[in-house]
Image: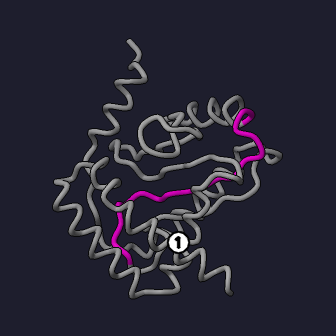
Amino acid sequence: MAESYQNKIARVLQESVSLVEYDPNWPELFKEEKLHLQSCLPDELIRRIEHFGSTSIPGLCAKPIIDILVEVTSLTEARARIVPLLEQQGYEYFWRPSFGNDIPPYYAWFIKRDHKGGRTHHIHILESHYKQWESLLFRDYLIEHPDVAREYGELKTRLLKDCHGDRAAYTEAKGDFIRRVTKIAKQYYRKS
């Protein structure tokens, strides 16, 4: 019997979160996945593929999961053409809200796992106007400001202990820091 969508979401949310020290292999893992996606996704739908999140920031502790943003020309077309393709390759697919619990706009999100079932990649597929692209400003700012990246790493370590490995609570708890630094980054890069 197939797993219901609600059970699938509940299962994924129950997976605990852990942090590891920065791995210098993460950029290469991103490049390998980018090449794979470029080789199998329809060229006419894809605009850019970017590495973001903590694994994209040298020296920062992170969940050992490569986060990837994929810009598409049309989410409708992506759902029709990319979702079946990646599901066939074993990626888990979710039509995910951008903010909070069931708050639009939605986008296509995939989890890629290793042979043991551990998450290796999160693929976020969205159009260019989605707010998630601001994550690149956050990334670039932390790369350029190692002291802020260090502060973020310390916060993440503390929050992980406070949240007892609860993935949703941990993600929510980081929100204020991310929003604050993203606002600073937007102003900073506007001046550059």
Residue at 53% x, 79% y is: 141
191 left or right, relative to 166:
right
Instruction: Establish if 66 lies above or below 117.
Output: below
Q: Is residue 178 above or below residue 115?
A: below
Q: The C terminus lies in which quarter of the figure? A: bottom right
179 with respect to 83 (left or right): left
Which residue is at 58% across, 31% downward? 88
- Tell me which colouring the rendered structure shows: one colour
**Residue at the spot x=52%, y=86% of the render?**
144
Q: Quadrant of residue 82?
A: top right
Residue in the picture at 48% in, 46% down: 99
* Residue type for callout 1: Lys
Relative image position of residue 64 (x, y in whole percent): 37, 61
Decide whether residue 65 is among the magenta residues.
yes
Residue 171 or residue 31, whichever sits in front:
171
Magenta stretch in the rendered image: 60-77
Magenta stretch containing residue 44, yes or no? no
In-image side of 174 versus 88 (left or right): left
Q: Position of residue 30 (x, y in %)?
A: 55, 63
In the displayed orientation, state which residue is furthest to the top. 1
Residue pointed to by mark 1: 183
Tally of numbered discs: 1
Residue furthest to the right: 44
Q: Secondary structure at mark 1?
A: helix
Using a 10 Å C-alpha cutoff, classify the residue at mark 1 as few (fewer than 14 neighbours), some (14 to 19) or many (20 or more). Answer: some
Vertical side of 92 occupied by 51: above or below: below
The quarter of the image holding the N terminus is top left
Q: Position of residue 40 (x, y in %)?
A: 70, 44
Q: Percent position (x, y) of residue 59?
A: 39, 80
